Each structure stands twice: as structure tokens, then as C-alpha cells.
Amino acid sequence: MRNIYEMGDIHDVHEIHSSRMRKHWRWLTRILGATVFFILGAIASGIIGNFGSNLLTWLWGLFATSIATNIWPWIITIIVLVVCLSAASYWRWQAWLLNHALGTMSNLVQLDDSLLRLLASWIRARDHETEMKRILAELLRDASEEFHGHVHRASILLPSTDTGGQCLTNKVYWPSLYHLA
């Protein structure tokens, strides 16, 4: 920043002085505004707090008087409230269950569609063993989607022909190289 005496122009000196005064007033108004809003907030909080306290005391008196006069309307109200909340939670659970069943059915339809599409491509293929493994790998992939991302691998185990069906061997697994092809 240059020295005021080196500037030479009185207009520049006046501009620097007015800029400093504006910053000073800006900070002063911010501090005063925050103080005023804090005081107004405290007053409003006290008024609202006192009103709420008085209202709660008045309502509690009405409630105690109502129970002392006749308790049966309150018992009936509580029973109706419990029944309504139970019915609402049952209907919500039933809606979730039906949505889950609908999602499962949709995944089964997609699995069936995938099987039909892959069987049509198998007719043209020459290597039936490779095509069978590819079809089964695709079926495993589609079936694993039913578990919403919680299953990342699957396999099909078939009886081994080497041991006369005594042991199981892993014929197809997913993810596999057939899935990438």
C-alpha cells in the first residue's frame, strides 16, 4: 500500500479514507445486528417457552379433570388407537410382502425369457458342451439377481461320471469365462 503523501491526488486520499470507513461501518452494523437478533431471539424464546409451559399446564389440568369425571372415553380411545396402529402396520407389512412377491415373479419371468433366448441361440451352435455351459452360466447370473446383489458367485454341481455318481463335480460356475464371451 502506498503512503498517503506519495499519492499526490487528494481524490485518492478521500477514496481510501471512505473505503476504510465503509468497512468499519459494515463491521459495526453486523455486530449490532447480531446483538439485536440475539436479544430478540431470547425474548421470543422466553415468550414462546412461557406460553408452551402455560398451555401444557392447562391441558394437563383438563386431562386430569376428564379422567376424574369419566374414564371410559379414554379407554375406548386408547383401544381404537391401538387397533388402528396395528391395522396400519399389518397393511404396510402386507404391501411390502406383495411387492417382494411381485419382484420375485418378475425375476422368474426374466429368467424364463433368458432361457428361451439362449436356447434359440444354442440351435445354431456347433459345440454343444460349450453352449450348454454358457446357457447354464447365464441362468446362474439371472438367478443370482434375485438376491439383489447379495450373491456374487454361483455354481451347478452334477454327479461325476468318473466315480459312478458318487461325487459331485462343478460343471458350471458364475462368473465364468462363458459369461464374458
Image (cartoon, rainbow, N blue to C red):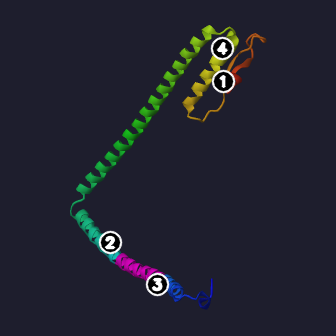
Asked if residue 109 lies left or right of residue 69, the reply is right
Q: Nearer the viewer, mark 4 or mark 1?
A: 1
Work out how far the residue at label 4 is from the one at label 1, CA to CA, in angstroms. 12 Å
Indicate which disc, 3 or 1, sits on the residue closer to the N terminus: 3
Task: Identify residue type, mark 1.
Answer: His
Mark 1 = which residue?
Answer: 179
- Quick one: 163 or 18, which is closer to the camera? 18
Which element type, helix, strand or loop, lies under badge 2?
Answer: helix
- Horizontal side of 125 relative to 89 (left or right) equals right
2 or 4: tag closer to the N-terminus: 2
Is 108 placed above or below 129 here? Answer: below
Magenta stretch? 24-46
Q: Extreme bottom residue here? A: 5
Residue beneath disc 2 = 52
Of the image marks 4 and 1, the number of the one nearer the N terminus: 4
Residue 39 lies left or right of residue 135; in this view the side is left
Q: Residues within 10 Å of mark 2 (few under 14, many from 20)?
A: few
User: Which numbered mark, 1 or 2, is in the foreground of this view?
Assistant: 1
Element assignment for label 1: helix
The answer to whether mark 2 and mark 4 are in CB contact below 8 A is no
**Which mark, by number, is residue 25?**
3
Mark 4 → mark 3, Cα distance in angstroms? 83 Å
Between 4 and 87, the one lying in front of the other is: 4
